[in-house]
Amino acid sequence: MNERYLITVQGTQAVDGESETEELTTTAEYTERGGKKLIKYREYGTNETQADIVVTNLVKIDGDTVSLTKRVDGRTGQMIFECGKRHQCMYANEVGNLTLGIYTESLVDKLSAEGGTLEIDYTIDFNGGFESENHILITLKKTEE
């Protein structure tokens, strides 16, 4: 059964000693099926050049592995997070797909049907060179029906 939640996704990226944090709050659906946890939410463009862009996100937590699938403008990309492992992933954005290396340093899942958090620390490399250190904090709160 799909339940309605309020999701806050806070992402911090550090490059060359300088960091930038972005935050998104929107509605989401959360389900638990076959031992997996699924979160689905949408992002909408907020500036003139992205006004018509809708990004559909699906976060799948399967044990110690988290995947984030993004669908934007007919393209699909996926980032895979698994603690202590590096995955080569396709990242979809409004410009196109990029191939990135994702190395997960830590992953803490405290999500349940009542809400909770998912926290991931990871690095990104591009063309074999280090790009950035990253932190994602996803917070889910059940909405009142």
Image (tube, rainbow, N blue to C red):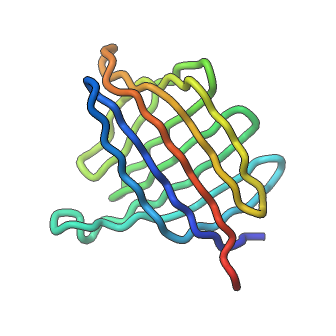
Tell whether 29 sits left or right of 92. right
Q: Which residue lies at the image location 27% right of the left edge and 70% below the top edge?
A: 52
How many numbered discs, if any? 0
- Name the quadrant of the N terminus: bottom right
Image: 56 above or below 37: below
Q: Which residue lies at the image location 47% right of the left edge and 37% below the top edge?
A: 135
Q: Nearer the viewer, residue 113 or 71?
A: 113
* Residue 113 falls in image quadrant: bottom right
Image: 105 above or below 143: above
Tell whether 88 sits left or right of 106. left
Image: 25 above or below 128: below
Q: Which residue lies at the image location 41% right of the left edge and 64% below the top edge?
A: 43
- Name the quadrant of the C terminus: bottom right
Q: Which residue lies at the image location 46% right of the left edge and 24% below the top edge?
A: 88
Q: Residue furthest left?
A: 48
Relative image position of residue 111 (x, y in whole percent): 72, 51
Tell whether 1 sits left or right of 124. right
Q: Nearer the viewer, residue 53 or 111?
A: 111
Q: Residue furthest bottom?
A: 145
* Residue 55 falls in image quadrant: bottom left
Relative image position of residue 3 (x, y in whole percent): 71, 72
